[in-house]
Amino acid sequence: MLHTAVLLPFLLSIIILLIKRTKLVHPGWVVLPLPAALFVYFLTEIHTVRTEDSIVSTIAWMPKLGIDITLVLDGLSLLFVLLITGMGALVVLYSIHYLDKHTEGIHQFYIYLLMFMGAMLGVVLSDNLMVLYGFWELTSISSFLLIAFWYGRERSRYGALKSMLITVFGGLAMFAGFNMLYLMTGSYSIREIIPQVGALTEHSMFIPAMLLILLGAFTKSAQFPFHIWLPDAMEAPTPVSAYLHSATMVKAGIYLVARLTPVFAGQAGWFWLVSATGLVTLIYGSFKAIRQTDLKALLAYSTISQLGLIMSLLGLGSASAFFSGKEDAIFYAMATTAALFHLINHAVFKGSLFMVVGIIDHETGTRDLRNLGGLMTVMPVTFTIASIGAFSMAGLPPFSGFLSKEMFFTSVLNIREFDLLNSSFWLSLFPVIAWIASVFTFVYSMILVFKAFGGKLKQDKLDKAPHEAPLGLLLPPVLLISLAVVFAFFPELVSRALIEPAMASVHKGMLAPGETFEVSIHFWHGWTAEIFMTLGVIAVGILLYRTYTRLRLLDREAKGTNTLNRVYDASLQLLERGSGRLTNAYMTGSNRHYLMYIFSFFVIALLTVLVREPGISFGMEQYAPLSIYEVAVVLVMLLAAFGIPFAKSRVNAILFTGCVGYMVTLLFVLFRAPDLALTQMIIETVSVILFLLCFRYLPKLKQQKETLRFKLPNLVIALGVGVTMTLIALAAIGSSPFEPISEFFLKESYNLAGGKNVVNVILVDFRGFDTLFEIMVLGIASLSIFALIKLKLEGDAQQTPKPGKLRAALPVRSNDVILQTMSRAIVVIIVIFSLYLFFAGHNNPGGGFIGALMTSAALVLMAIAFGMDQIRQAVRVNYRLLTAVGLLIAILTASGSFLFGAPFLSHAFGHFHLPILGDTELATAVLFDLGVYLAVVGVTMNIILTIGEDKQWNS
Amino acid sequence: MELVMALAIGILFTIGVYLILSKVLLRIILGTSLLTHGVHLLLLTMAGLKQGAAPVLGDADSYVDPLPQALILTSIVISFGVTAFYFVLAYRSYQGLGTDEIDSIKEVKE
């Protein structure tokens, strides 16, 4: 069921996507039932969670990596899922009236909102840290999308990017922290990590892991100095601000701190970081809130400050882990109770205040405090909601905010007695900071109410005449804010049902099995220090508010002077410019540079491995004997190769390369590779012809006027590659870490495939798949060449070399009688020989490739002797079609094995007694080879004729 | 013999890479050809040289390794296709742009 609960929002978002075209019904009505139903479902689970331990369900995902989707519903999760689904339902209801159904992108709005809801449920239910992280980032992404909902506005895009960069930065840090936890404990499961804490604390990675995880929590929960994204996130539609940026998403960091308290509490660092960061954020946020003129900005800073309050309470609560004695522990754990209670209260009053601001914006067209005033009489209901919300926020009775504020005071007063860390001076500052921040909180709460609703209506500054909002907009905040009153008079409702089980999750170690926390919250404790603090807050607050009005601070609101924002903007700009410069520095657009990077990397990587990897030996004990012929062939090859860079003309360079090729052919002969020798010889011949066809008419090779600065790096890199390759060759000869598979081919070639030429058998049978793709690649190459030649390039007309410069396309024309006469005879011989090679291929050197190349060679010879036109007329074959037919035969033969239930490319063979031929072996492999033959002939001839004809056309 | 071949392979690679890093299209293409030859000889040398008869089954006691040969055969044909494509690309770019130097091709484009 838990998995379904997380999955449902995602499924529903798909449905929203499907009904995108219909304008009949507001999509909000489709969405609304889901959070409402989930809320009710989770309410019914309260009893189970209270009485039993927790609800666990697991779906295996990547068990080998220790990543399973384990969802756990315990007290803490329950508190949050109720918050998410309950607030979700109210916000959706509110949004239906806030956003018209004709709003552009309204469907996207709900898709993102559902995505967020599902992700947030995932965050608070996941037990596995990796799954939690995944959902965590998903909330950042949906928040990004929702802030940028009006992406046409520059401020929206800016705010969206900022929130994304900061929260994802924190998320990544947290990810690293999670992995450190995994390295220390061998588990991603929070429930499995907690029992190992004892051994963990001594680990050197423990503190770094804590810091990284806190970074994630602080960025998400907008703690100082990472809070700067939250005010800019207010560009989102107001329902989003109410939901994500006050009630739920920003509390994910709080959740994480609470969730991991059993792991990290008891660390002095954790105590100080969490409580001090919280307090600093509290006072900073409350002070900044006073100076805002935009109502939403005021609420944003107020949210920052309240999040700081909750965070600091969690830090104070962690002090209880220092004590083993029950009484002391409970004394400090009171702070955690306050944190959880204030978390609920904050969602209640801040959610309704955001909705109020949305209503004001909706009805008056502005959120600027300088233009607002006197709305009290025009919008009495809204005013009532706003007052209750603001008074609750300020901590005034009789609202629930008062209760949690009192508990906050109690906690900061209690912490003065915490004497284990020898820092009573700093701890005694805590109540002072808390008190000052409360005064500021009181002031901005009053500003919110009396600046907007008190005074006179400034109709001249408003675009429209304000009036009370429709019922649909009022209902959600009314429902929500009534909780502030209900919780105040009946705090047991939340304390027994929600806070006690949640306490049990946060302070796991403090309870014996079967025990539960007893949390009781009261209005009146007598004339305690707390009540005097509250009275002081009210007195000083009223004084300050009056001075503030007189000082007219609002009109002097300085714009954009926030140092932290400037730091953010500047560093972002620096990063962008820096990375731009860096990229431009090495992405030069020159192929040569890229090749140099590739080759350098190749040399460095391989040489490092060759030198440092143990067990690589160079060279062998027994080299094959050396004969004078072989040395001569190698020397000629190398001399020819050396000649290429120094060749003055194109033809020379081409001929030198050809020479290298022929020497390689000879080496193939010497090294007993007859198939290779045959193939290489023909390919070399055809290649040289091609070279000459293509390059004959290009201008003379210019003398390279390259500087030494150009040549030297090339030479160094080239030498590096050469040395590396020599070493690789020696290493490959010297070490063979495993048995080669070649023995199998030699042994089974005849038995399994009925062929004696092992190389050919490998090509057409054992490794037939390779060959199939190979001829496909060839086919693609030949078609590309065809397209390149036939394609009329832009600017061809002007740039083509003048016709006068071009001589006859082929060097030899039909007037060479001897060649023509000779070739008539020779071509026949070659073709017959090629057919022999093709058929003999299975048992003797030869085969489809070689036969095809030989046939092509014959055709090329004819083309040279008689001209391209003649050959076209004499042999009327569409070579592109031939390629296709060849490929088709090969594929059909390969798939033919399906008919016999055998896998792709299975071959059969048998010996048959045929008339005349006698005992003949027939193998389907021959059929496959035929496909290869036809395809290769088609490809070769297509290439040669396409190029050759293009020449003729030019002349 | 293997030692000589290893050196020869190194030299082929050196010249091949040097040519590939030059500016003229023709040299670059010829460089890739040399590189291909180097690879083929490397594959052949890796398996050990002249350790038996050609891999056509008969009466011999031992045969040379057929697997590198099959690999090389595939490679020869593929590299023919690729080289042919390079040629035509170079030829066409000269026709279209009037230059066969890689840097000036970039300039013309710009």
Image (cartoon, rainbow, N blue to C red):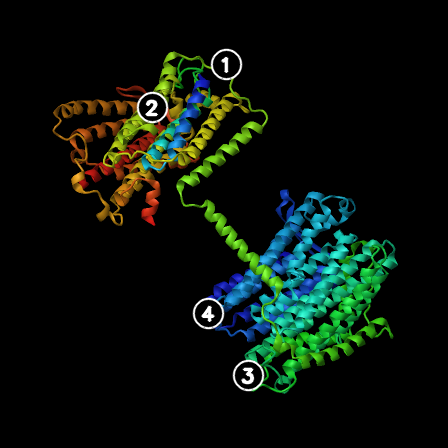
Alpha carbon distance from label 3 to label 2: 90 Å
Q: Are marks 1 and 2 on the same chain?
A: yes
Mark 3 residue element: helix
Alpha carbon distance from label 1 to label 4: 81 Å
Asked where in the image residue A781 lies, by quadrant, the reply is top left
Q: Do labels 1 and 4 share a chain?
A: yes
> Pointer 3: residues within 10 angstroms few (<14), some, or many (20+)?
few
The mark that comes first in sequence, 3 or 1, is 3
Residue indicated by mark 4: A22
The subunit letter for the residue under badge 4 reads A
Residue indicated by mark 2: A640
Q: Position of residue A589 (x, y in %)?
A: 41, 45
Q: Where is residue A317 in the image (x, y as percent from the top left)?
A: 79, 60
> Pointer 4: residues within 10 angstroms few (<14), some, or many (20+)?
few
The subunit letter for the residue under badge 1 reads A
Foreground: disc 3 or disc 1: 3
Residue indicated by mark 1: A622
